Amino acid sequence: MLTPAQCRAARGLLKWTQQDLADRSEIGLSTIKKLELEVTTPHKSTLKILRQTFEAHGVAFLDENGGGLKLRG
């Protein structure tokens, strides 16, 4: 769905801070910090919202065989 590494990478592609992601996704900043530090695993619904937020801003998630992320357009 969305791994901690993918979350960090997607933020990097968009040049977003953790706060930027929190504001755009309406997910708590502490939840994002804990996800990226791999302290806890958020609910699947939270991961889905984060991924949808990235996708809405141009991040494409490639399948495991293609590997990684890219910006669309």
Image (spheres, rainbow, N blue to C red):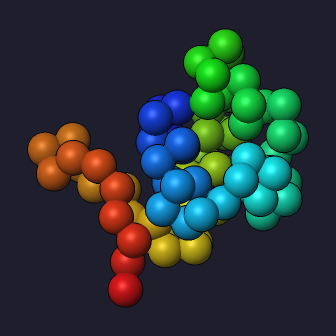
Q: Is residue 18 left or right of residue 11?
A: right
> In the image, residue 6 lies at what x, y percent?
45, 42
Q: Is residue 64 above or below residue 23?
A: above
Q: Is residue 37 left or right of residue 62?
A: right
Outermost residue toward the left? 65
Q: Is residue 44 left or right of residue 73?
A: right
- Give me the residue at 60% from left, 46% from top: 48
Q: Quadrant of the C terminus?
A: bottom left
Question: Is residue 17 visible from the viewing direction of this image?
Answer: yes
- Give me the residue at 39% from left, 71% from top: 71
- Give me the residue at 81% from left, 51% from top: 19
Outermost residue toward the bottom? 73
Looking at the image, which is closer to me, 18 or 2? 18
Q: Is residue 2 above or below residue 14?
A: above
Question: Is residue 25 visible from the viewing direction of this image?
Answer: no
Looking at the image, which is closer to me, 56 or 18? 18
Q: Is residue 34 above or below residue 65?
A: above
> In the image, residue 46 lies at what x, y percent?
69, 39
Q: Is residue 45 left or right of residue 52?
A: right
> In the image, residue 45 lies at what x, y percent?
67, 39
Outermost residue toward the top? 39
Badge count: 0
- Give me the residue at 38% from left, 77% from top: 72
